[in-house]
Image (cartoon, grey):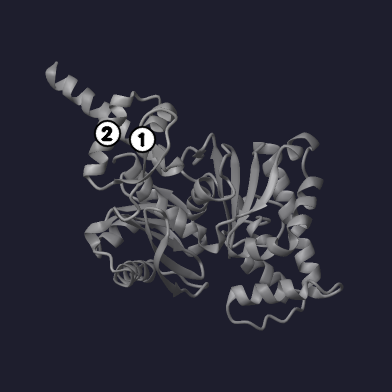
Amino acid sequence: MAQRRRGTVRDLRRGNRAVLLRELYFSGPRSRQELSAATGLSQASVSNVTRELISEGIVAEVGSVDSEVGRPRVLLQVNPDYGYVVGVDVGETRVQVELFDLAMTEQAKADYPMDPARHPAPEVVAAILAGIDAVLADGGVPREAVLGVGIGVPGVVEQRPEVIVDAQTLGWDRVPLERLLRAGTDLPLLIDNGANTMGRAELWFGAGRGTQNLVVGLIGSGVGAAIISQGTADRGSSASAGEWGHTPVVVCGRTCRCGNVGCLEAYVGAEAMLERYAEAGGAVAAADQESALAALILEAGTAGTVGARIIDETIRYLGAAIGGLINLLNPERVILGGWAGLLLGETYLDAIRDAARRHSLRHPFATTSIELCTLGPDAVALGAATLPLEMFLNGE
């Protein structure tokens, strides 16, 4: 009985720490009195836990505010220099690695271009490991100060009994990504689908703040989505929810990279947009996808051009797909991100909204806003870095 009681007390203390850390992280700086009111914990519990957190260097005192009665109230916040997190975005055109402090301020960044036509797992693993070493060296951060590395990847990520990635469009069939990375690092590793990590970043820090139900669409070379329900990513029964790019928009349509036909990705992904442009007689001059798509969007500003026709078609397909999401899921917001989504949305967001309206039921469309990702094209890496950050905040 005594052992069970010790375990119960320890669990309660860990739970109190997690509650206070999360409140301070997302709402700080806060006084002890404000923490007690916000969390429902007694002032004695708040004082005991914050004393521990301050002694460990996790929380710092950062000034004071006047009190209506008695002495000024000391303000507390999470110490941004206590530790660091690394976020990795495994995209189809590059592997991007970023180092952040606990305030999610970027400290260093490494970028490794990839050939969109080939993504051998050993090359991706080598780029990730090289990137981790590079950002730690550039940031002057010792390995022992790193709380963990979060990695966002395309495809389906199975977490147990070991992390396995199935990314059909990359040619990855049950790649044991964590095991491959373990050969080169002993840092804690957390791996998730890249659209989910971008969704988490937007929910925590970006256009999704203050919402509980949203869809975050990632449009790059391909297309994916994070479905957030009641503040949590909906992964489905086998972790494959969110493969928005492989929902059909055209019966017996274009062949998608996944091997099926008529997928959204075969019309809206950057690779597909450029293929459709070339097939229609457009001249793709730039060697890399991002420059080529930017040129296509620029040409689309001139009426009657091939570029204008391709972008107009793309907006209609995308609007229909967003309308389907609105009718099916009734989200508070649909947020478009990814480098290609941002390029398209910066010029054509109003047109995308109008196309979605034409494919939505009147009431759910009226209660949904369609916005652009506010965190920019680095949102996947930022969101990936929140994976070890969340473990830290939860006391794991």
**Residue at left offset 34%, top offset 39%:** 394
Q: Earlier in the sequence, mark 2 or mark 1?
A: 1
Residue type of the residue flagged with mark 2: Val
Percent across and percent down for residue 267 are 69, 61
Please tell me which residue lies in front, 98 or 88: 98
Percent across and percent down for residue 174 are 39, 55
43 to 209, vertically: above or below:
above
Q: CA distance from mark 2 to mark 1?
A: 8 Å
Q: Residue furthest top?
A: 1
Label 2 neighbour load within 10 Å: few <14, some 14-19, many 20+: some
Tell me, for residue 311, which label it has, or none. none
Residue type of the residue flagged with mark 1: Leu
How many marks the image carries: the answer is: 2
337 to 271, vertically: above or below:
above
Please tell me which residue lies in front, 121 or 304: 304
Looking at the figure, which quarter contains the C terminus? Answer: top left
**Residue at left offset 53%, top offset 44%:** 241
**Residue at left offset 51%, top offset 39%:** 234
Tell me, for residue 20, which label it has, or none. 1
Percent across and percent down for residue 91 are 49, 64
Report helix, strand or loop for mark 2: helix
Percent across and percent down for residue 189 are 31, 54
Label 1 neighbour load within 10 Å: few <14, some 14-19, many 20+: many
- Tell me where residue 376 sits by quadrant: bottom right
Please tell me which residue lies in front, 285 or 388: 388
Disc 2, disc 1: CB below 8 Å? yes
- Tell me where residue 344 sits by quadrant: bottom right
Q: Is residue 259 left or right of residue 303?
A: left
Q: Which residue is mark 2?
A: 49
Q: Residue furthest bottom?
A: 285
Residue 186 appears in the rendering: no
